Image (spheres, rainbow, N blue to C red):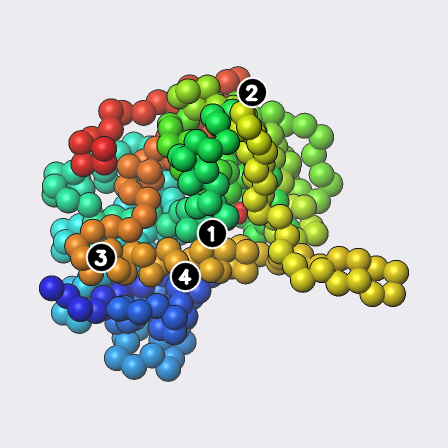
Amino acid sequence: MTKTLRVAVIGAGRMGADHIKRLSTRIHGAEVAAVVDVDLARAQSAIEGIDGAVALASAEEALNNGDVNAVLIATPGFLHEEILYKALEKNFPILCEKPLTPDAESAWKVVQAEQALGHKLIQVGFMRRFDAEYSALGAMVRNGGLGELLMLHHQHRNPSTPEGFTNEMLINDSVVHEFDAIRYFTGEEITSVQVRLGKPTRSAPNGQHDPQHVLLETESGVLADVEIYVNAKFGYQVATQASFEDGIVSIGGDAGPYIQTAGKWGGNVTPGFEDRFGAAYDVEVQSWVDSALRGEIGGPTAWDGYATAACCEAGVEAQKSGEKVKVRLNTKPDLYK
Ligand code: ISE
C-alpha cells in the first residue's frame, strides 16, 4: 500500500498556491511532487523550498511522471474535465476543486466514467462540509434532537468580485457552495430554484446584478433562501440560520476576540474565504489524504459535483426567467448510494 501521496497540484493560482502551502507544511502523509501551471514561472516559484518537487507546464506530463501518484486539481473549472479523465485512467486519487466541471452534462459523463471503474477516486472540494460549525449543524439535523429541520436562511457576502466575474458566476461560483451545503445539511436533493433580482448596489460592475435572492426547495419540502451579495464591501461573511421544530441554530457568526476601547466595541471582519475557511481546508485535505491512503475518498463525491452542477444550471435559467425552475437529475448510480 502507498505510504505517502506524491501529489501533482495542477494550477498554481489563488487556490492552488494555498493548497501547495498546506500540503508542504501542515498535511501529514502527502508531499507536493509536481506543480503544473501554464505560466511556468508561477509553477517554479510555487515549488521554491519544496524538496523533490518539479515545476511543469502540462498536466499530462505531471500525470506521466513516475514520482506522482495523486492529483489535486485547482485550475479554472473549464479545464477540469480533461485532467479528470487522465487521472481516472491512471487510477490516481483526485481532489478536484469545485466545480467538478462547469455544466451538468459533462459532470454526468465524469460520474459515468468513475462508475465504470467501479470505485470512487474523485473527491470534490466543497470545503464547508469540513468547517466545525457546518459539521455540527449537519449532525444536529441527523440526530433529530431539535425535531425536524424546517427552513434554512443563508447569507453569502463577499467584499468584491475579481475582474470578469459575470452575473452567472454569482450562481456558478458562489451559490454553488450553498447548493452543496443545503444538500449536506438536509441529506436531500434540491428540487427547484428561483432567483429574484431586487434593488442592485451601485458597487456592482457592469453586467452584474448584485445582490440576488435565491429560493430553494428540497425533496421533503425544506425551504431555503440565500442572499448572495458579492460586492458587499465590508468583508467576507458566510452564515446560516436553521429553523427546527424545537429551536433555532445559527452558524458562521463573526468569531472574537471582541474588544472594547475608547467608546468602541467590536471585533475584526474576515477579509476572504482563505481566512474564513482556512481550518476547514486543512481538515478537508487531510481527510482526502488519509482516505486516499486507505484506497477510499474522504468527502463529497463526483455525484455531489454533478448534483450541484444541475442546481447551478437550474439557477442560471431561473436568474434569466425569474421563474421557479425544476432541478433535472439523472438516477443516482449504485456507486454513490
Ligand atoms: C469563490 O470561488 C469561492 O469558492 C468562495 O468560497 C466563495 O465565497 C466566492 O463567492 C467564490 O467566488
Mark 4 vs 1, N-terminal side: 1
Q: Residues within 10 Å of mark 3 (few under 14, many from 20)?
A: many
Residue 250: give x, y in percent of width and height.
59, 40
Q: Secondary structure at mark 3?
A: helix
- Residue of label 2: 322
Residues tagged 4 and 1 counted as in contact (Cβ below 8 A): no
On screen, residue 299 versus residue 275, left or right, reads: left
Mark 4 vs 2, N-terminal side: 4
Residue placed farthest to the right in the image? 263
Q: Name the amino acid type tagged 2.
A: Gly
Q: Is 323 rendered above or below residue 49? A: above
Separation (CA) of disc 2 from disc 1: 35 Å
Q: Secondary structure at mark 1?
A: helix
Residue sitting nearer the eye, 40 or 96: 96
Residue 122: give x, y in percent of width and height.
25, 48
- Residue of label 1: 132
Tell whether circle 2 marks a residue whose Cβ is less than 8 angstroms from ligand 1: no
Q: In which quarter of the view is residue 39 placed? A: bottom left
Question: Which mark's residue is nearer the viewer, 2 or 1?
Answer: 1
Mark 1 vs 3, N-terminal side: 1
Mark 4 vs 3, N-terminal side: 4
- Residue of label 3: 292
Residue lying at 26% horizontally and 34% vertically, measured from the top left: 108
Residue lying at 42% horizontally and 40% vertically, measured from the top left: 139
Mark 3 vs 2, N-terminal side: 3
Q: Secondary structure at mark 4?
A: helix
Residue lying at 47% horizontally and 51% vertically, measured from the top left: 132
Q: Is 249 rendered above or below residue 122? A: above
Q: Is 184 rendered above or below residue 299? A: above
Separation (CA) of disc 4 from disc 1: 12 Å
